[in-house]
Image: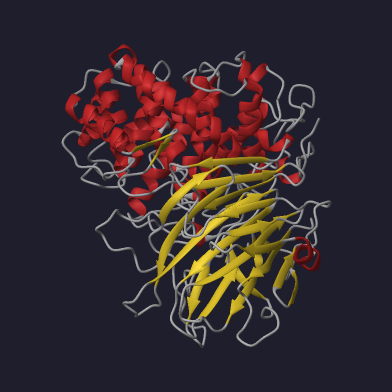
Amino acid sequence: MTAPHVSLTDPTHSSFLPPPDPVRSPVTGWTRAHWEALADRLLDGLLPYASRGLAQYRLPGRPGHAGSWSDGLEGYARSFLLAACRIAGSGGRVPPELIERYAAGLAAGTDPEGAERWPPIADRAQPMVEAASIAIALHETRPWIWDRLDDAVRQRVAAWLGGFVGARANDSNWRLFQVVTEEFLASVGAPHSRAEIDGGLARLEDWYRGDGWYTDGDGRKFDYYNGWALHLYPILWARIAGPRADASLTEVHRARLRTFLSTHQYFFGSDGAPVHQGRSLTYRYATAAPLWAGALADATPLPPGRTRRLASGALKHFTERGVPDERGLLTLGWYRPFLPVTQRYSGPASPYWASKAFLGLLLPAGHPVWTAPEEPGPVDTADAYLALPAPGWLLHSTAADGIVRLVNHGSDRLPPPPAEAEAEDSPHYAKFAYSSATAPDTPADGPTTGPDSHLALLTADGTEVSGRGRIHPLGAEGRRAASWHRAALPGSDQGHRIETTSVVHGPWEIRVHRVEGPPGAVVREGGWALADDSGPLTEAAGPGWALARREADGLTSAVVALHGWEEPGADGPSHGAVAQVRGANAYGEYSATPCLRLTGHPGRPHLLVTLVVLSADPVRPCDPEVLRARAGTRVTAAGAVVARFPDGTEEEVPAGAGSG
């Protein structure tokens, strides 16, 4: 049976794919043959941009901050990882020119006098990242490439990779690039530092926060790097190290990955879309990499048919939406090119870290992940709720519309105290919520903190907006999570504490805010930002509510005032509004965010309660008037808030008690 929102038909731009197989893959229709065909399409698309000696791929697009020389290496290294999965996964039974192409690139790129020589590996330099991909690819293709290289080329490759020995890496996931690269050097008898390998693995221990979650360096830096880097590289290191690997340490890594995958499976919507949160999102379906790592290391709790369903669902989701593009290229963006979803380090070939999604091809064609019938993912079959205390997150998903929502009360990507919080929030970390069906507004210029999924203090003219800054978690348990932050208007040294508790049920979230602020300050809260390419979204607003709707599929974002939004002297809450912008959202050209506004903060701690809705469920109501009539709030004498959801379910939030 096909899951909701998943089609077994392929659009015309995917004509290079084989027909779907509804028997083996009743959910997505995709099989190993689809993965191989897409890998071939991606590799073929790069050929027009290869340098004469095949050592660099100079793709069109904005250069990364490391410069075009490094960008060309990036194109080679990241696509070599994809080629390695294709070559090794087929036992070398690929067109010989694919093997020859990457062997030739090794010879040209490591020639220190050559016109296509690669930039050297130096302290904290981008080639460190690319060296790790080359080392992994060389290990996996050893019988077909490394073992057949001329001795002189092997020595040059080892010398170039050897630039890692004694070099200083960024104190983050980069430490693992050094681990895998130097372990490959050890495997071929080249100079390396066992102390640096052991030191990088030991540093990883400092970042483990429990329940399968690492922070990417010190602080609270939780995102997909947990899966496509911090879990992945230890598994790939063990494959390179073989009997040299510490068996007890390897088992620790496998156990943590198994724990992580028990929750990672909930991050994919029924249509295959991963939750849109964090940096480097242009890697797109690299979110599937830890799924395959679990299968490669026999470290997964997932049935093999579910592993393939989730991974194929992610790959298919983007393929159906024009990824790769008509040239066969992965562009800097999400679906279409969209630079605000990238970072300064992102160059034209950066998206090819998506190659990690193809690690499943290293498993033989007869492995159960390729032969077992697909099984639905957890989001396909029932509503789900999942508290993740380590990152301070709360997931809730609904089977009727296949949407996954992430409530964020813990990840801000800031350096740990006593460092000051950065002045500007990142839209991909600072929001209260993210989902598989929406993206935060990320304008190329103007304020970095848009109204969506944010509670802000504003100056009277609305031109200055407070950020969220450092997030102080107060716990995540059951269907509830909480945190506080200190809101300060730009240019002001005075911060105002805002404590927020989120309670979820079905497609609904009730946010209970206890807001400090200066007398007369404007308070604004936004719901989800919806986006569409076809034209402006439908909007509506009234007293205490606002709504935006995408007509194509009925996806609706709404906010409803439940308590505290009444203006001084008024009989009811202020009128809601919808903020519409263009060119600021990865999901579409036009975006709209429903908002509530309080124009006069009383100057003492003030309680605000809001119902926030994101839904395409045709049964559960999204009409704001119906929501207002059915939902509600009462405040007890002790100051607790009893929140009532539209279906009558009630949840009590104690006064100032966080999630406890």
Where is the N terminus found, in terms of image quarters? top right
Q: Is residue 622 above or below residue 234?
A: below
Residue at 38%, 60% in the rendered image: 470
Is 605 rendered above or below residue 357?
below
Residue 33 is left or right of residue 555, and the answer is left
Residue at point 47% right, 43% down? 224
Residue at image point 65% right, 58% down: 643
Residue 101 in sight from this viewpoint: yes
Res 206 quadrant in image: top left
Pick the residue in front: 195 or 66: 195
Q: How many marks on residues?
A: 0
The reply to whether residue 51 is in sight is no
Percent position (x, y) of residue 562?
A: 67, 67
Instruction: Please say if 32 is above or below 266.
Output: above
Taking the view exactly as shown, the residue that stands out farthest to the front is 637
Q: Nearer the viewer, residue 186 or 296?
A: 296
- Location of residue 512 by image quarter: bottom right
Q: Nearer the viewer, residue 503 or 635?
A: 635
Colour basis: secondary structure
Residue 535 lies, in percent from the top left, at 74, 69
Vertical placement of residue 588 versus 348, above or below: below
State the residue at coordinates (39%, 58%).
344
